[in-house]
Image: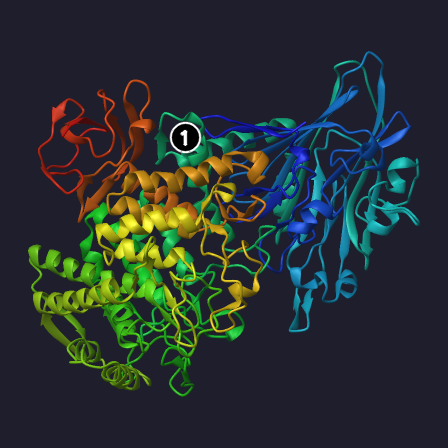
Amino acid sequence: MKPKLYLKENGQFKVDNVDKISYLYFPLTNYYSLKSSISPNLNGDAKIDQNSFALVPTSSEDIQNSFYNRNIYFRINDEYTWSITGNTPYQMLNKDEVSLEADFLVHKIIRSNDHFSCEIESLVPFNDSYQELHKVVFKNKTDQPLIIKPVISFPLYSRSADNLRDHRHVTSLLNRARIYKNGILNSPTFSFDERGHNLNKRNYGLFISEDYQIKNYWPILEEFIGEGNNILDPIVVKEDLNNEYKINESIEGFEITSGMELEKVKLIKNQAFTIVLSMIIDDDIEKIKNYTKSLSIKTFNTLKQDTLRAWEKELEPLSFKFKDSTLNGWLKWVTLQPILRRIYGCSFMPHHDYGRGGRGWRDLWQDLLALILMNPESVRKQLLNNYKGVRIDGSNATIIGEKPGEFLADRNNIARVWMDHGSWPLLTTMLYIDKSGDYEILLEEQNYFYDKFTHYTKKKNNEHVKKDNLLRDKNNQIYKGTILEHILVQNLLPIYNLGIHSNIRIEDADWNDAFDMAHNSGESVAFTSLYASNLIEIAKILRKLYENGIENISILKEIYEILIANDYKTISNKHINRDLFLNSVEAGCSGLKVSKNVQEIANLLEDKGKTLLMHIRHNEWLEGKEYSWFNGYYDDNSQPLDDVSKENMTLTGQVFAIFSGAATDDQIEKIIRSADKYLYNKDVGGYILNTNFKELKLNMGRAFGFAYGHKENGAMFSHMAVMYANSLYKRGFAHAGYKVLNSIYEHCINIDKSKIYPGIPEYINPKGRGMYHYLTGSASWYILTEVTEVFGIKGDFGSVVIEPKLLKRQFDDSGLAKIITLINGKLTNISFINKNNLDFGEYKIARVYDDELEVDYIETKFGVKLLSDIKSDNLNIILEKK
């Protein structure tokens, strides 16, 4: 039978025949940052960080094919071995019925056959422990008594992921296991690899509730399995053996498992055997003892309810009510995903096996988009800390440390420049300011990141670098500039770093990390558009500051000098000014600040931004006989990547031309038609990144070494597809934007095609499978688009702007669509009432009620701006015919 998904509006879901899908996994975590994944066969791992894995590190192939699972075996009537994982030889011939039930974040697998059922419910409690809890319930369904021998074994890997291949055996010699009355604890002596030997403080163990008597302990994995046997059918389970291991005994120098054999249990009809397990990591053995001492069914049930309530509270600030109740439930999981990425970073899930923890610069800012919508009070400090990662040359550190405001140049000290990085902080900061009205944050001062890399990492300067990695002036004093100055230097410097076609050089890559082989002559037209629109946005900010009584701002003298440089005539002039600036701040800045009129600076920035947008609109537009679109890139041979005559098209090149305003409405119409022709593929969830260029293109990037249709080479890459939707909505093309979002949703919710649990993956492969689930920036953008564009709940320096772009199919049968979201820190129910069943483009906002009080407003392009603060927690928007 095929798998079938049942998803409720509150996000709870069930999957029948879940074992018919491969590579599934589910997150189990808490803010204390135990990071686990679990599959229907109980595979997956659990860890605190790269060097603290309790279970064997698990990549995507291991999820399906490794047998180092969490495991509870049962010997049934002394006849055969059965396991909750489903992996025993008996179960390979005699299949169980398998279903999954899931909630936030609780995972339950139910295996059933004609004789008995067994369920295992798993969670990481929402508290200050590194602990996985599991409740196992084995129930006899027959009239005949069943005699079962329960045997538990979670192989305790207990070390760094690096040791999976690097000294796997040698590091087992460090193991020191100790037997306790209700469990086994492994406390290795060292954390060990070729870079050094550090005294280990971590303890890794598995414990059971003390209600049950352990007959035999089996701490050594090879003894548990038995000579000539394997982990699918261990000798300890299928034979009645005894050993001499006693409580408080230590075992040294072997691979450790938490083997615990319980006394046999006789179950009559409908009788159940229930046991609770805790796998725990901690530096404090006494803390472990305290947690496990209270282990019981009652404790598990209490912690389960606490965990469900806690995650419900986390998700409470944002929910949607469209006509499609399944969509509402699906969006709950998408809303959770940015939270998961703040915990896991871009690592520590089975597909995310390329990182060692932490997030990158782009991730840092995009994850905050969703947080601003859900918990804006916590964002201000994070924003201020994040700006510590900006270098004075406009580049930035790319790896975020564990502590707030801690930054590194890059993994393995290989410094690179993604030319798009400077564009994202402004978008995030402006969302915060528009929602909160806190424009004063722009005038707060912050340090700059300063390491040995200067000139966009093209040069090194070790002489002036201090251990704190802070920029200093010529007098060796730590220099601080305003947040506005940080934004300015990030967006101003790139427009002096142009290629021969007058677009910003791609350097080591842009958003598409795999466009990484055009260092010399490559250009990103796409992000030139975004930087240009950012300059215009900064000009608007400055004029807003002027309206709020701020006439002058203070900026570093060197930044002002490059701002006013006369450089429009030639690219070489721009490069001269770029190099003069970079040389002037190479060994630290002057520290001298100048006070300048905000209107003057706004005019300069707006002029530069508009000039760039006009250049792209006219010089990068590719007009064809039937189909037309923008060029998005130049390769390292200075040739355009997009080509109408060759039918070569990139989605990124269109997204930012639309988003920035470079594209006219007429051009957008042509882009939509072209994208539907060349980039839309319903079988993979919608709009793919690019057409098939049918060459390796070593002059553009490693993306073209990937098989076409995978990852950055032509997959439906959710992040850029969602940004395409956002751009279309932003410009008023709501029907086209809806098609993008709905295509992704409909594909993902079809579990037979997408083969993932509810949520949005990083991309869809050519077979339709969702890949790299949970940890993707597309989740933040999907939620942002639903809130600010579909429902149109925006801000303008703290004032509430409402510009709905809902389609008539999204309203329920009574003409109602609702969103619950935060407005000025208050959880607000916002109802859009469309009694005449009007479509976008046909309706306007006729009246706005703050509870029963009508609110005054002024009209905007797509809606209204309220002229007073909202007093109640209910807002009713009446839509009528234009």
- Residue positioned 27% across, 43% down in the render: 733
* Residue type of the residue flagged with mark 1: Asn
Residue 170, given in percent of the width and then of the height, sits at 78, 66
Name the spot of residue 422 as percent of width and height, x first. Answer: 33, 66
The quarter of the displayed image where residue 523 is located: bottom left
Residue 200 visible in the snapshot: no
Helix, strand or loop at label 1? It is helix
**Quadrant in the picture for the C terminus:** top left
* Residue to which mark 1 is pinned: 328
Q: Nearer the viewer, residue 735 or 409?
A: 735
> Relative to 661, is 846 above or below?
above
Left/right placement of residue 823 relative to residue 782 reads: left
Residue 551's place in the image compared with 873, above or below, is: below
Say which of 774 and 237 sits in front.
Answer: 774
Residue under the point 36% across and 25% down: 323
Q: Position of residue 710 (x, y in %)?
A: 55, 54
Q: Is residue 434 left or right of residue 198?
A: left
Relative to 61, 260 lies left or right? right
Q: Indicate left or right for 441 with 701 as reference.
A: left
Residue 208 visible in this rendered orientation of the protein: yes
Give the mark count.
1
